[in-house]
Image (cartoon, grey):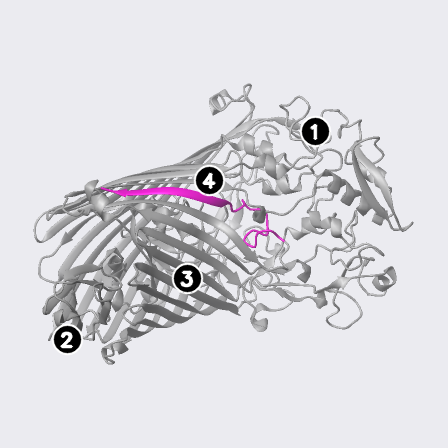
Amino acid sequence: MAQAQNIAVRGTVLSETDDEPLVGASIFCEANKTSAVTDIDGKFEISVPGGALLKISYVGFNTTHVKASADMTIHLEENIESLDEVVVVGYQTVKKADLTGAVSVVSTKSLETSSDTDPMRALQGKVPGMTITGNGSPSGTGSVRIRGIGSFNASQDPLFVIDGVPTTATLNSLNMNDIESMQVLKDAASASIYGSRAANGVIIITTKSGKASQGNKINVSFSANLTAQFYSSQSTMKLLDTPGYATAMAQAAMNDGIDPAAYASSYGLDLHAPSGYPVRIYDIASNRYVDYTVNGLYDGYINSRRTMMMSNTDWLDEISRTGFSQSYDASVSSATDKSTVFFSMGYKKNDGILKYTDFENIAARVNSTFNVSKAVSVGENFTLTHTKQVDCQPMENALKMPTTVPVFETDGTTYAGPVGSMADRQNPLRELAFNKDNALNIWRLFGNAFIDIRPVKGLTLRSNFGLDYDAAFIHSYNYTFHSDIVNNDTNSTTLSQANDSKWTWTNTANYSLTLANDHTLTLLAGMEMFRQSRIDFSGYNEDYDIETPDYMYPDASVGVEKSTGNKSAYALVSYFGKADYNWRNLLLASFTIRRDGSSRFGRNNRYGTFPAATLGYRISENIRKSWLNDLKIRLSWGKTGNQAISNTARYALYVTDYGNDRVTSTAYDLLLQQSGIFPSGYVASQTANDNLKWETTIQYNAGIDYSLFGNRLFGTVDAYIKDVKDMLITPAYLGAMGEGGASWLNGPSLRNWGMEFQTGWRDELNCGLSYRTSLNLDFFRNRVTYLPSTTTGSYAHTTSENLVESRQPYGSMTGYVFDGLFQTQQEASASGQDNARMGGMKYADLNGDGRITPDDQTWIFNPVPDLSFGLNVELGYKNFDFQMFWQGVLGQDVYNNQKFQNDFWSVTDAGSNKGSRLLGAWLPDVNTSSTIPMLTTNNKGDEGRASSYFVENGSYAKLRTLQLGYSLPDKLLSKLRMNKARVYVSGQNLLTIKSRSLTCSDPENPNWAYPIPTSVSFGLQLDF
């Protein structure tokens, strides 16, 4: 009977956008639990009860429910992700499916909930081939590198193009919620349309335009993010406390046969104190431990003025705090047939985890378009931002200041400082406190205005004028202080102002036509002019009677007054053209050419020409299989240029020098006045080079795009070769050349090559669970292919072995091979190694001559990791959503500079605080299995020389993001007259998995940079 009630349903599922059939769409009937999948023509058949509801779903389209009937045609609407199907590349918008270059379309969804201040930091590990590094400072800027190293001396930063306006400035003033789409042009063929500044890749950002919400002319959005940041124990080295500090100090002295009490006394410590910290020191001579009690040398004080009591200060704790960041964004959007308008206000503030460091930004944006007629449209995209930031990097001082030094002297207000033989290191908390008024303030105007004219069908003429103007101001205060042996008796201020104006005027003609319904041709022609002008000036003044920020202005000073200033400018003019060809969506081809002229080069080589060509073939158009949605192969070749050098690179420069050095001063008593200010001559500082020419990058790329099984499996594969020629450099020169020997030259050549993989799977199950997972992998290799004799020795470690012949990557280092520790003095004496000692470092004799000399050096450090990866997992169930993102690198060498402090007492800063690893150093008869050299008060054996001892495996995997969100149900939203209401909680940098052999805490920070915090965020997103 049940079977008799069923009806046979035949239907077709089409895209609402273009009426194209959707292959692999899913049809499910809850009533009898039956399902079907559409064929290559979008057709399906299914037997269901009459009047039953059918659920039709397809990846990239909104799921819909329709009542079953015998013959059905169902249209599915593209969801928000379909915006990624149309991308902006090179003064044009094209379908993603028609791309023939290596272009990564970035999902901007994660930017909306990120607590980072710079959108580039939020994309770390999410784009194959794009490497982003940075630290945890509140300003949050990230260093971006696309496909390896682009240059030696010239800039390696990519070009950002925001709404058609190029810029190389950092993006931390950009409101991330304003970003609609982002594309990364990685190969030269994609980027060559931008020619002169595209050698390091191009990142195109399009901001939001006005849109209307469902049934309304106006859409209102609001979002908020509150984040707590914590000082992670994984982010810094483990330090000695006061007992450990005294133990290491005294053990180093005992190992050298020095009276430990006398040695400690020079650092304000009494090892024979009647009370204090008990410590045990191993005496090599008597083969026993000796007990001491540590206190201040001066009855508990560590300085002769008796103003500083011996302490056990945790300097990291003293300078750190729980950081707090907050961001808010509100926008109003509307759209009609006549116009679109988008207005937003954004505010973000980040109080970092180090005291008195912060970042604050407020941004207002207006984007609008008006249709004056059917043929004419005008519009603008404009943003005004104000940024205030206070940066300070006291980490090295905090990690090296002895714990015995208190934060304050006994009066509770004077900042304490080092004593005796300690290095004259600054009190890190005083550094932060005295720097809190030194805020950098930046006002920035950024935007463009345009007019589009469509005189005939298919032809669009556009004129676009862009402006990027910023005014930066900082008032730096240098206060007086007295911290025992570290003092400053002269207060001063420096007021600095910089006005930077950049404008770009672009005019293009874009014409599209279709021939015989099979051939589509798009032609682009254009010209562009760019000019940058910058004015810098500053005033320096000394001696103020009152030390307060409101008083310390130049007019109040009574001492030295100095002023400096300069103006610089450069200009570009460009002509470009592009032709795109499409035959039946089967064969795709394009050709681009751009000619650029730069004022930074002389008349002999002012212009450079940068062509490119691409070819694509969509195999899936010839293989009609239901499981194959898209399969395309791509080939490309192109040239791009780099002129990111000094504006005066080609000139001969002469400067005056009123320095105190009578040898180098250019002031002469030409008038024999014998006193006063002498007239000045000039000294050459740079030699002219009218033959200076463009640095050029030539890149080859082969790629595959695929989408299978109803678009559930998707991905790309790219392989590339990137040759950089005629690098712009400033090599070292022989002192015999005298003044003015410095000059800019064209020199080395470099080759990068590598591969990028991105794959993912997405699906929606009948139980209501949807999921999406994606994995990207990339690797690159590089080597110097040409190094002229004029540059040998100008770069690290090119003298002992030639970079070209050894085929080592740029940035590699040579050094000695660590071969363990000398176990006896007899072994050390027979080693042929100068000043070798028992328990000291032993180096391998690579050339077998019985001695350790510079000839025993070899390549020990490779800066290029074996592999980088990013793994993203997204789940959705009913109204809940979950995201997890991992990022990491494998096979990465780290030159661990912290090891100088962790493993040695005297290699650097004897008497400063050290890492806790020192307590496990080698000792005869006690700890001979240790790999940490025996402590010593001197460094006669030069154990800080470059060696493999400091090179460690820096492989890691970091849980960058873990997020859980909840959205209100649609029924409740309709009652509240809302489109969206979502709350979420998110954690960042929650877990680090690293190599066991790595002795520094954070593989991303083996030095002294601002630590990367662990953070937890709470957020809210509303749409009305």
Secondary element at tag 2: loop
Find residue 228 and name its label: 4
- Cβ–Cβ under 8 Å for marks 1 and 3: no
Tell which circle, 1 or 3, labels the residue nearer the N-terminal end: 1
x then y, percent, for residue 847: 74, 72
Q: Nearer the viewer, mark 4 or mark 3?
A: 4
Q: Nearer the viewer, mark 3 or mark 2?
A: 2
Find residue 693 and name its label: 3
Magenta: main secondary structure? loop
Range of residues picked out in magenta: 1000-1024
**Mark 1 to mark 3 CA distance (whole Å):** 55 Å
x then y, percent, for residue 688: 47, 55
**Mark 3 to mark 2 CA distance (whole Å):** 44 Å
Amino acid under disc 2: Asp
Residue closest to the far right: 286
Crowd class of label 4 (few under 14; some 14 to 19; many from 20; radius 10 Å): many
Identify the residue at image location x=69%, y=23%: 410
Confirm whether residue 750 shows in the render: no
Secondary element at tag 1: loop
Amino acid under disc 3: Lys
Amino acid under disc 4: Ala
Confirm whether residue 465 shows in the render: yes
- Cβ–Cβ under 8 Å for marks 4 and 3: no
Q: Nearer the viewer, mark 1 or mark 4?
A: 4
Tell which circle, 1 or 4, labels the residue nearer the N-terminal end: 4
Residue closest to the far top: 545
- Cβ–Cβ under 8 Å for marks 2 and 4: no
Find residue 484 and name its label: 1
Q: Nearer the viewer, mark 1 or mark 3?
A: 1
Q: Is residue 936 above or below residue 183?
A: above
